[in-house]
Image: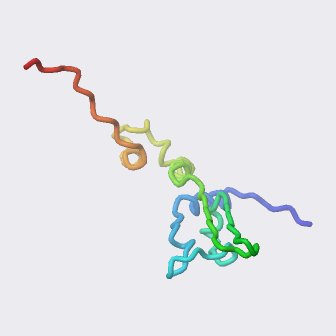
Amino acid sequence: MQASVVTIERLELVLQRLAMVDPRRLYMHDGRMKLPHEWDDDTAAAVAGIEVHEEFDENQAVSGCVKKVKVWDKRAAIIDLLKRRDLAGKGEMGSPDNPMIVRVIEIVRPAPAPPVNQETSAP
């Protein structure tokens, strides 16, 4: 049995797959979910887990099925890929020296809540 060789290129390919996953590729054109052996390599690599719950009728025949597919964290993969390509290492995050990482952080970070006005007006 030959051991699998892990290279930087292979690891970077995995990060690219996670960062660019398109969940629409899990489904057929009519909306039914594809079977795992029908997924392309990029989609299959991005899947973190599958949960299937089948419901049975009184004759023990399958009467319904719920399928859940979880994909790996896309945001984390994008940031890891930027760091890997040294785009996050050029200047402090959020600095004018590194405008690309500033924009990515703005996109993936949720907007802050608006401030609450503490003043109350008397009638």
- Give the quarter of the image for residue 96: top left
**Quarter the C terminus occupies:** top left
- Give the quarter of the image for residue 13: bottom right
Residue that sits furthest to the top in the current view: 122
Labels in figure, total: 0
**Quarter the N terminus occupies:** bottom right
Image location of residue 58, percent across then percent down = 73, 71
Residue drawn at (37%, 41%) of the image? 97
Residue placed most toward the observer, 68 or 64: 64
Residue drawn at (63%, 74%) of the image? 39
Left or right: where 68 falls relative to 75? right
Residue placed most toward the observer, 120 or 62: 62
Residue that sits furthest to the front in the current view: 58
Does 18 appear above or below 65?
above
Left or right: where 76 falls relative to 102? right
Residue drawn at (23%, 21%) of the image? 118
Does 77 appear above or below 89?
below
Image location of residue 62, percent across then percent down = 70, 74
Residue placed most toward the observer, 38 or 67: 67
Residue that sits furthest to the bottom in the current view: 30
Image location of residue 86, percent across then percent down = 52, 48
Image location of residue 74, percent across then percent down = 53, 55
Does 53 appear above or below 115?
below
Residue drawn at (65%, 64%) of the image? 45
Does 110 appear above or below 61?
above
Residue that sits furthest to the left in the current view: 123
